[in-house]
Image: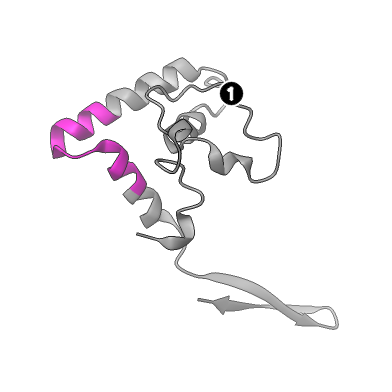
Amino acid sequence: NDISLTDYIAVKQKFKYQSYLPHTLGRYNKKRFRKAQCPIVERVANALMMHGRNNGKKVLAVRILRNAFEIIHLLTDANPIQILVNAIVNSGPREDSTRIGSAGTVRRQAVD
């Protein structure tokens, strides 16, 4: 629905984004903005691997994600990836702020 996020949510633009298993072994941080080409389910799995004791345990993160998607499918009878995309769109910021300043003084100005 949100036009500004269509470039950054890689779900169905190309065939390589449609992966069954979110474990593509891709190097998406080597160049700037290449992480936008990473499948969105894999980015969520990578975000689960945080806080020391979970570093590098991607198989565990994929299993947690698969079980969560199964629960979502059983409760709502909807596509769990579509529900994930809707949640990401709803969590995005509605407006931003920019810096406006002269002679060293900076104030924030809201931008729609």
x then y, percent, for residue 109: 61, 79
Q: Is residue 38 above or below residue 96?
A: above
Please report the bounds of the magenta region as a residue range.
69-85
The local crowd at label 1, few if under 14, some if 14 to 19, many if 20 or more residues have their Cα within 10 Å, is few
x then y, percent, for residue 12: 39, 41
Amino acid type at circle 1 is: Gly
Tag 1 residue: 52
Q: Quadrant of residue 31?
A: top right
Q: Does residue 34 belong to the magenta stretch?
A: no
Q: What secondary structure is found at the residue carrying circle 1?
A: loop
x then y, percent, for residue 1: 34, 59
Q: Does residue 80 belong to the magenta stretch?
A: yes
Please state the total of marks drawn on the protein image: 1
Name the side, left or right, on which 93 lies relative to 90.
Answer: right
Query: What colouring does the structure picture have?
Result: one colour
Q: Is residue 101 above or below residue 34?
A: below
x then y, percent, for residue 110: 56, 77
Q: Is residue 14 above or below residue 56?
A: below
Q: What main secondary structure does the magenta stretch of the protein show?
A: helix
Q: Seen from this angle, which residue lies furthest front?
A: 15
